[in-house]
């Protein structure tokens, strides 16, 4: 997965530039017409619709409020056993942790990694251990994004910090969570759409 993400980062502009080079390569008799079209349709116009502009808010909208993993949470007082059961039931790898009675107040995140390292490896009981005792706490290594964060920035944060889930917050508190799968799908879809737009540009669709 990490190798695939790095490939997207390193090759994303290669795809675009290859298509743009194709636009610029034309017989001499055609070049004036080609240049005229390029001047009327600026690179900035293509860029503003490209994958670089996709935001986390777009990912959350695509997932929808009912999507598993988008709005799943537990509290600091829940047992680790109950949290893991919720993970298994919804087929997700992490839960947002909130303070008891305050669903919008982000306290941290609990992941499969937390369970393995702090319960299984240490021989602790998941039924007698509270989520708040093993979670990654807000303000202590917990990485978050906002709805306005660019998808590529979120992907970079995940890659650099070797994490697979990031809570999404705004001024009102916690509003959701995105996974590495969510952001990779968003980038792949934007690449596909952008190549289609560039192809339409070459063929005179713009």
Image: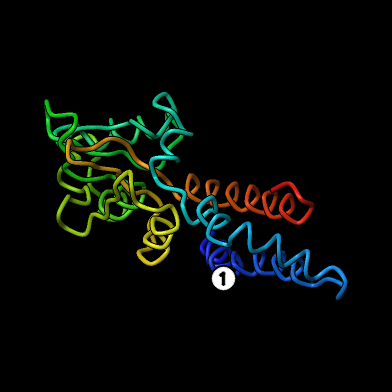
Whether residue 124 sits left or right of residue 18 in the image: it is left
Q: Position of residue 78 (x, y in %)?
A: 19, 32
**Residue at left 72%, top 64%?**
19
Which of the pair 202/187 is nearer the observer? 202
Res 34 → quadrant: bottom right
Measuring from the top left, give residue 64's x and y in whole percent.
43, 28
Q: Position of residue 80 (x, y in %)?
A: 25, 38
Reading the image, the residue beneath label 1 is 10
- The residue that appears at 64% across and 47% down in the rendered structure is 193
Q: Nearer the viewer, residue 35 or 114?
A: 35
**What kind of colouring is applied to the model shown?**
rainbow
Image-based side of 93 in relation to 27, left or right: left
Picture quadrant of residue 102: top left
Tell me what residue is drawn at x 55 percent, y 46 percent.
185
Q: Residues within 10 Å of mark 1 (few under 14, many from 20)?
A: few
Q: Is residue 56 left or right of residue 101?
A: right
Q: Nearer the viewer, residue 122 or 149?
A: 149
Relative to 124, say whether 11 is above or below: below
Position of residue 195 relative to residue 95, above or below, is below
Q: Quadrant of the N terminus?
A: bottom right
Q: Secondary structure at mark 1?
A: helix
Depth check, front residue: 76 or 108: 108
Q: Is residue 206 left or right of residue 69?
A: right
Q: Residue at x 41, y 36 (%)?
A: 60
Q: Position of residue 120 (x, y in %)?
A: 31, 50
């Amino acid at each position: 997965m990490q190798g695939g993400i790095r490939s997207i980062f390193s090759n994303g502009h290669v795809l675009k530039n290859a298509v743009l080079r194709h636009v610029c390569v034309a017989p001499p008799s055609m070049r004036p017409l080609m240049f005229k079209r390029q001047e009327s349709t600026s690179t900035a116009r293509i860029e503003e619709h490209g994958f670089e502009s996709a935001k986390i808010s777009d990912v959350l909208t695509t997932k929808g409020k009912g999507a598993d993993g988008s709005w799943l949470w537990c509290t600091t007082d829940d047992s680790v056993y109950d949290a893991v059961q919720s993970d298994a039931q919804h087929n997700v790898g992490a839960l947002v942790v909130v303070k008891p009675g305050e669903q919008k107040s982000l306290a941290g995140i609990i992941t499969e990694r937390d369970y393995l390292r702090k319960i299984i490896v240490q021989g602790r009981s998941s039924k007698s251990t509270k989520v708040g005792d093993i979670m990654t706490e807000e303000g202590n290594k917990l990485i978050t994004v906002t709805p306005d964060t660019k998808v590529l920035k979120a992907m970079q944060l995940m890659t650099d910090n070797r994490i697979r889930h990031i809570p999404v917050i705004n001024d009102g508190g916690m509003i959701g969570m995105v996974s590495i799968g969510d952001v990779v799908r968003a980038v792949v879809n934007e690449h596909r759409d952008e190549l289609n737009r560039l192809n339409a540009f070459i063929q005179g669709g713009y």
